[in-house]
Amino acid sequence: MKWTSLPRRLHSGRKALAVIGTLAMATSGLAISAASPAAAATGTTYYVSTSGSDSNSGTSSSSPWKTLAKVNATTFQPGDQILFQDGGTWTGQLWPKGSGSSSAPITIAGYGSGAKPAIAGAGTVPDTVKIWDQQYWTITGIDVSNNAGSSASNLGDFRGIHIGGDDSQALSGFTINAVNVHDVTGVDDWIGGSTSNNKTGINFQMGWDRAKDTGGIVFNTTVPDIASPPSTATTLNDITIENSSIENTSWGGIVLKQYTGDAPGAVATGWGVPSSSTDSRYAPFTNVTIEGNYITQQGTAYGSNGILIADVRNSVVQNNLINQVGTCGIELDYSDVASVQHNEVTGTTVKAGGGDSNGIDTDMGTTNMTVQYNYLHNNDVGFLVYQIHWGNSVWRYNVITNSSKYSMQLGSVSSATAQIYNNTFYNTSSSMAWLMTASNYAFTNDIFYTTVASPTMASGTGVVYNKNLYGGTSPTVPSGDAHAITGDPRFANPTAGGTGTQATGPDLSAGLNWQIAATSPAANAGVTIANNGGIDYNGATVPTVPDIGALQHSTSTQNPAFKDTFDSLATGALATGTDGWTVTSTGNAVNVVATPSSTDHSVELIRTANTGGTPGTNITHAFSSGLTGSFSVSADVMRDSSTSGTGYFCLPYLYNSSGAPVISVAFSNGEIEAYEGTTLTNIEAYTLGSWYHIELDVDTASQTFTLYINGVEKVSGAGFRASATSINSLAFYANASNYGDAYVNNVTVS
């Protein structure tokens, strides 16, 4: 799974999103059905097929192994690859032995073509895929399930992918990429609550270690003997979960949790539940990235959290779409230093015995939390700040809309702090906020808009308001906000909404419906906040005197906004003049096609002949007044074939008023290339058949640009290829002997 609709910037991510596609295996002539690990320079490749035999060597596709038992009985070495044939299904547990190394992980993947190879636990094993007391493993391109049955009586101690250990070692190097994990019927065990509410498959008062440890992808640890634990914890480091789908997995979608020793008969270690923020026993997992995933529990009444991050130091959770889960979309407990950003969370409600139903929750014992650039909508509760015991958090540049109960729920201890600034709240219920306990909540530069008269606001000791805007139907203005502004924020289109899909990813652009107009009373009305992150929800620079709300108003009046999705166009030849495009297709073809889908069209450039002169096979859009100042040009593009020549496709080129190329991005011979000034530079490899989101942030004043690929900055502040005071046209094309196909979609100037 790879999305083309990505946030404008992912400055804080530890890793770039992996490119998913097919990579030819030079040694076998086959294709691995997911991203191939760059480090697998050594090692042996093993093949497994339902038509194979365990008496085979397993080292070629013509002599594959057959069973999981054979794989599980083998100790693999660094750089080895275990490839399951696409389209096959194996029932039981996959637990290969051995460890890779930091430079040569062991990889589980698929080969061939067709559906991902499926490993089905079928409720016969606790863990369908297990890695235990091992390290440096990559799991990519497989399908995993563990379904014991559809009734509550079938719920049990089940997980899809389970990684952890109990050997008191620091285990590192785990990547889960492009997997489908689904239909895991795990029991719902809760830490607290009342046992009087126990039901079949739902249990309360289970304590830390026995709760919240079932579901789709689980990273946790334990000890060999709970009555006599070792003095050193097992810890996990360098975990990446990306580009995957997790669907209908109870208890949770993705779970990370350290052992603490609180089960009956256990000796407490304090590793997972420290007694204070300075408790020396605390033994967190470290360096975790969760990005680009689709998580839903909409098909199960027992699915709870989308993501639980407990006992983690240094985590990034970004660019995920979490849809219709129970209890919480993204929850953090006993964790330190986290960035939760560029996520869409929608449809969270009460399920599976849980008491909460919020989009994001910084919960007990969480410190140095930054929650920013998220679109939280149509949840029961927008977000929860529940820093009991201790905690501090920053909530900024989030768009929170259409919460059915409260926009926010506040329940921290009095010593905790939460800075909540430059957010946009669009309230549709009788309560904007539920203050459960007094704490230090500072609201600054926020927009509080309500469609329901006189909503409840948080007030009391420790709650401070300063320079917020209150609008809508009889908004409640806290008496403590001495610099309150009331009025219509003049949102762009607040009733439009918008929700991402599994195919497209989070629809963060829907949050732009709450961008304010230049004439808004919120424009240029905020107060300066130190260390404010520098950019707003949409990536615009936050000036010294900022706007109120999550989005700065547009300062560009001379640049025309332009967007073409091609979705409304009939399939077939694209005629020149359509949507303002000049089309050149002499001897070749430029067609509107139903790719990626029948409802999501794109333009396909097909070049098979050296005709058309300099324009070649081309679509060009001119800007009559020229684009000046700072602006963004973006598009989704894909190469499908390159049959001869250099295969150089311009995707896109931007030109000045004289027709000279100013900014040039090309897909050529497997490389994405760009001119930095007058130097052509290879940026990164691309995969045929994969979509890429190209964004160019242009500044004609400084004559520089910044290039983002799939939301990740690749070129920063590069000079123009030719001098330009304006950009007068953009084009997608190939000419001369550059043959093949290219697709163009979602062209946007903003």
Image (spheres, rainbow, N blue to C red):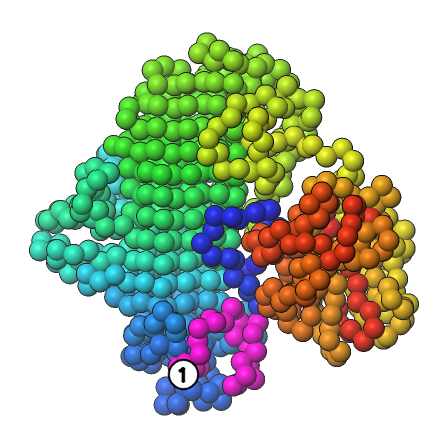
- Count of numbered circles in the view: 1
Quarter of the figure with the C terminus: top right
Nearer to us in this view, 689 or 130: 689
Q: Is residue 32 magenta?
A: yes
Query: Can you say whether 125 is above or below 669 in the image?
Result: above
Query: Can the viewer see residue 344?
Result: yes
What residue sits 31% from the left and 34% below the top? 391
Query: Can you say whether 250 is above or below 670 in the image?
Result: above
Quarter of the figure with the N terminus: bottom right
Nearer to us in this view, 498 or 625: 625
Crowd band around label 1 with a 10 angstrom C-alpha radius: few (<14), some (14–19), many (20+): some
The stretch of residues the image draws in magenta is 22-48
What residue sits 41% from the left and 86% below the top? 58
Q: Is residue 540 magenta?
A: no
Q: Amino acid at mark 1?
A: Thr
Query: Can you say whether 279 is above or below 404 in the image?
Result: below
Q: Relative to 227, is 445 on the left or the right?
A: right
State the image coordinates of residue 738 (x, y, percent, origin top left).
78, 73
Q: Relative to 531, is 411 on the left or the right?
A: left
Q: Quadrant of residue 131?
A: bottom left
State the image coordinates of residue 73 (x, y, percent, origin top left).
29, 79
Q: Which residue is mark 1?
A: 44
Question: SS at mark 1?
Answer: loop
State the image coordinates of residue 380 (x, y, percent, origin top left).
47, 31
State the image coordinates of residue 521 (x, y, percent, origin top left).
64, 19
What residue sits 56% from the left and 36% below the top? 536
Query: Can the viewer see residue 204?
Result: no
